Each structure stands twice: as structure tokens, then as C-alpha cells.
Image: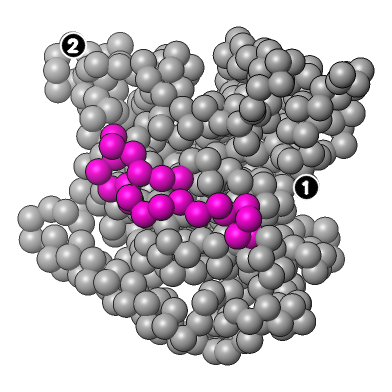
Amino acid sequence: MPSEAKPAESFVEKPKTLAELREGIISGRTKAVDLAAGYYDRIARKNPRLNAYLSLTKERALSQAARVDALAAKGEPLGVLAGIPVGIKDVLVMKGAPATAGSKILEGYRPPYDATVVSRLEAAGAVLLGKLNCDEFAMGSSNENSAYGPVRNPIDTERVPGGSSGGSAAAVAANMAVATLGSDTGGSIRQPASFCGVVGVLPTYGRVSRYGLIAFASSLDRVGPFASNVRDAATMLGVIAGHDSHDATSSEAPVPDYAAESDKPAAGLRIGIPAEYFGEGLDPEVGAGIERGIAALKAAGCTVKPVSLPHTRYAVPTYYLIATAEASANLARFDGVRYGYRSPASENLAAMYRHSRDEGFGAEVKRRILLGTYALSAGYYDAYYLKAQQVRRLLAEEFLRAFAEVDAIVTPTAPTPAFKLGEKTGDPLAMYLADIFTVTASLAGICGITVPCGTTRDGLPVGMQVLARHMNESAAFRVARAVEAAKI
């Protein structure tokens, strides 16, 4: 007979791992509906200050939790995420729930279908709490570009949580969800995870379906998880990964048991250290944290050696040419005709297009549309977009050569800790440089993970980025788990 149910607040106020929470639900020590209610209470207290959630899906969440409890009461087998409260970045669609992508232009849009990753989470038993704030159309490195206000970093609310998936990172850091989903185009999972002191995963391009993801740059966009620890992140990836007939770019490669893979020791793995990531612009305290992480890997039995990635210096301009070009094409569909915002100043078709897009899009989105349109225009395509694609190929080839010699590459995730709100908003180029260590993996299509690697003197988190070759997330998880175990 199950024991008397324990109040959900004890699970919420004292964070537990995914496995601990699931075991409590299976044993009857807690109820999934109580756990969800406890998280909604916490969101009600914390979110007004942090602004991580844009909307809540209580009816759907509590209905799913009740199904989990009914199965548990019958002793039926439960999914790997049974009863686990999860948040969803608002660039992923959920049937009937608002899907704003952080933009005014999608105000009022409620999609008629679920993203594949949403369906897979619920099939595994997850309880989906709501939609999380983000930079508009995932364009930003600070989560200050949202039309619905900035997200604040739970570690220091005067600082940014990183972007574009700032709400997803902040929700995990503030324990307003056990795990969340975000999207990463040039660092939008890894950088906010680093700034908020949580784990964030960039899967290999094609590893996770993009069906139901509101597109920014289709050759770069990826969906991945956030969690408070490496094993939970591995479990989440195992649920959402795999081929999807709705996404022609999704891989048919079999999905390993990432959680079990993360349990394997890192001893014997070869770790590459690229000098190009440790030069000018790297905050000394961030660099010191990464050095401690490297020392921990040596102590865990890894072999460390230098590798060279000389085209890294071209990564930021290459990324911002390709990403903006693809954004200009993808965002052409938002015109005020079929859904979303339509300007009242629409006396004719041309005026409706012009005013709806000008009033509906924020400054950063308009900047990137203009940059991308220019790069694709007649007379400039070969000089900019085509050249950027050629450099992208060189970057990818460099990584392939490096991975012939090492199993993983470790770098800082971001050049600095979380910066102050408003510190970089007046200088777009300085904001773009916050992605300098993350865009290379995005361009190459390889996988990566960021894991907490100590803090600065001010208590701000430092993140270590672990990169691995295509479809070798298992190696990245093993390395990240060794860094996590060192408790730097």
C-alpha cells in the first residue's frame, strides 16, 4: 500500500532531481497534481519579479497530472517524465496556448497543433506548466528584446539571464520548473544556462525535430533542454530526440540512452583545448573557472591536449550573415494577413504590410531583417552570403579534423559572467560578441553542453562548454558529468 502523500511544497521548496520526484509519485509519497499545484504557487510568488513565464497552461497541466496519478494508483507503468513539471519556450507551439515568440506581431495567435517535442514530453508523462519568455523570435543574447519585458537573472535580478532562452534558464535556476525546453540558433541555450548556473544542451543538428518551432534561421535552429543537473538534461534529451516524419531534416540515427551514457566515467577520454577561445576578451575569472574545470577533468582520468581552430575568428560575422539572411526569408510570412497583429493603419494592402511589420516587430528583429535582406540582394549575394557559407564549411571541417584527435573540446561558454540589464542594449555589436564562443558549434552542426564550473567573486556562475562531434552527445554528457562531480 502506498504511504500517506507528502505535501508537494516540500518537493518544490527543496529542489529534487527528476528521478527523485518520479520515484515519489510512483511510490505514492506525493501526487502529481499536488506537485503541479506547488509549482504554480511558486510561479505566482517568483514570476512577477523574474518575468520568466509569459502564460500558464494550468488546465492542460492539471489534467495531465491527474492522468499520471490515476496510472500510479493502478500500479501501471509510468513514463520517464511522469508528473515532472516542465516549462516550454514560447517559440514552440502548444495547441490552444498563446505562441508569441516574444513578439507583438504574434499577439493573440493560438496554434491548432503541438510541436513534436511537446507531444513527446507529454507522452513521457511530463506536466507542461506554461510558455516561457524569450528574446523576440529568439533574436538576442540577453532576453531584453522581448515585447513583454526582460527576464531577470535569479542569481542577481539586476543582471540579464542571457538569451534568447532566458526564461527557460531562469525558470530552472529559480526552481519554477524541474526542466525546460529552449531553442539554440547561435548560443541561445548554452549562454543563458551559463549565466544562470544551470545545464543546457545543444543537440546535433537533426537530432531533435524542429516541427512546431517558430523559425528564426532554419539551417541553425535547434531545440534542447535545460535542467539543474547533467543527468536530468540527458533524460530530457532522450525523450525529445529521434526521427520525425514531419521534419525532413531530422536524423534517423538511433537514440542512445543518454542518461545511462552520462553515468559512464570520463576516464580515458581525450579532451581538446583550443587556444583561440582563451585569448583577448575573456574575463579573467571566467578563464580561471575553466582552468579549474580542466584540472578536474585531468583528475578524473582524461587526457588533455591542445587543438587548433583558426577560423574561429571569422565565426561571428559568418553567423550574423547566414542567420540574418535566413531570418529575412522566414519572417516574411508575418504580414498581418492570416494571423497575429494587423495595424489599424491599413487603408490598402501595401500600407497593411508596411505598418503591421513596422509596429509588430521590435528594433532588433527589424535590424536583422534589414541586414539579411541586404546580404541576399542582387550584387551582394556572392560577396556576403555565399562567402559566409564557404567559411562555414571551413569551420565545420576544422572541427572534424579536431575530433579525429580528441573525443571532446572544452571552452568557456561565454566570455563574461552575466552582465547588467541595459549594459549592452545601446551597442548591438558588443551584444553580438557575447556569442563569440557559441556560434562556432552552431555553424558546424555539432553538439554541445554547458555545465556550471564555479562562480566569480561576486557569486556569478561560470559555464564550461563541452563540444563533441555530430551525434556524439554521449561523450559530451560524460565530460560534463565529470566536471559537475568535481563541485568546482
Residue that appears at 25% across and 51% down = 325
Residue that appears at 64% across and 27% down = 77
Q: Mark 2, residues whose alpha carbon is within 10 Å: few (<14), some, or many (≥20)? A: few
Residue segment shown in magenta = 241-262
Q: Amino acid at mark 1?
A: Ile
Side of 174 where 68 appears, left or right: left
Is disc 1 in contact with disc 2, using a CB cutoff of under 8 Å? Answer: no
Q: Quadrant of residue 341?
A: top left
Circle nearer the N terminus (1, 2): 1
Q: Mark 1, residues whose alpha carbon is within 10 Å: few (<14), some, or many (≥20)? A: some
At mark 1, the secondary structure is loop
The residue singled out by tag 1 in the image is: 155
Predominant SS of the magenta segment: loop
Using the rendered image of the protein, determine whether residue 331 is visible from the camera's viewpoint: yes
* Image coords of residue 265 (percent x, y): 69, 70
Q: Quadrant of residue 385?
A: bottom left
Residue that appears at 17% across and 65% down = 386
Question: Would you place residue 441 above or below residue 122 in this image?
Answer: below
Q: Looking at the image, which is closer to me, 336 or 177? A: 177
Using the rendered image of the protein, determine whether residue 126 is visible from the camera's viewpoint: no
Side of 392 where 441 appears, left or right: right
For marks 1 and 2, give the one nearer the viewer: 1
Q: Amino acid at mark 2?
A: Glu
Q: Which mark is residue 347?
A: 2
